[in-house]
Amino acid sequence: MMDAPLIPDPNDIRAVVADQLRAARKLRGLGLRQAAARLGVSPSFLSQMEKEQRNVSLEFLFKASSIYRVSVDVLLGRDPLPGSSKGQQLFDLLARFFRPAEGT
């Protein structure tokens, strides 16, 4: 009997994206205000995204990936954040959610 496909919990994904956004911002040496200005949002809005209090849109993810010079896969936790052991931990955590379906 085949296992049912694993569907990630949206709260888990939100937590990973929040952590990755914060880590990528800090990796680039940007303060909250500076990053928010570059991203076109208020510092409080960015802070809320980094604290899992707001959902992040796809458009925002792509803009953040450009500003922070990391791939969207890094922000989604699918690839480790360059130079960060936490990125590897998140990568390992989410690897089970994004593994190829059996038989493909």
Image (cartoon, rainbow, N blue to C red):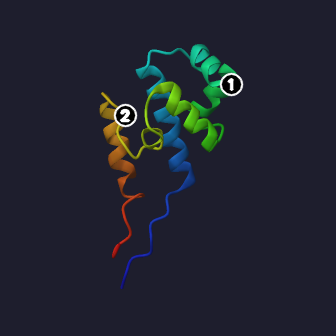
**Residue depicted at 37% across the width and 81% down the height:** 2
Judge whether 52 appears above or below 96 on screen.
Answer: above
Residue nearer the viewer, 41 or 47: 41
Q: Nearer the viewer, residue 60 or 88?
A: 60
Identity of the amino acid at label 1? Val
Residue 1 appears left or right of 33: left
Give residue 69's position: percent from left, percent from top: 45, 28
Classify mark 2: helix, strand or loop: loop
Q: Give the secondary structure at mark 1.
A: loop
Which quadrant holds residue 102?
bottom left
Which amino acid type is marked by label 2? Answer: Leu
Question: Residue 3's spot in the image, x, y percent?
Answer: 39, 76
Q: Quadrant of the N terminus?
A: bottom left
Residue lying at the far bottom of the rendered structure: 1
The numbered disc on residue 54 is none
Label 2 or label 1, whichever comes before in sequence order: 1
Residue in front for this viewpoint, 92 or 24: 24
User: How many C-alpha atoms fall within 10 Å of the one at disc 1: few (<14), some, or many (≥20)?
Assistant: few
Position of 12 compared to 52: left or right?
left
Q: Which residue is mark 1?
A: 41
Q: Position of residue 88 (x, y in %)?
A: 31, 39
Q: Quadrant of the C terminus?
A: bottom left
Check if mark 2's residue and mark 1's residue have beta carbons within 8 Å: no
Point 45% across, 71% down: residue: 5
The mark total stands at 2
Judging by the rendered image, the residue that carries numbered circle 2 is 81
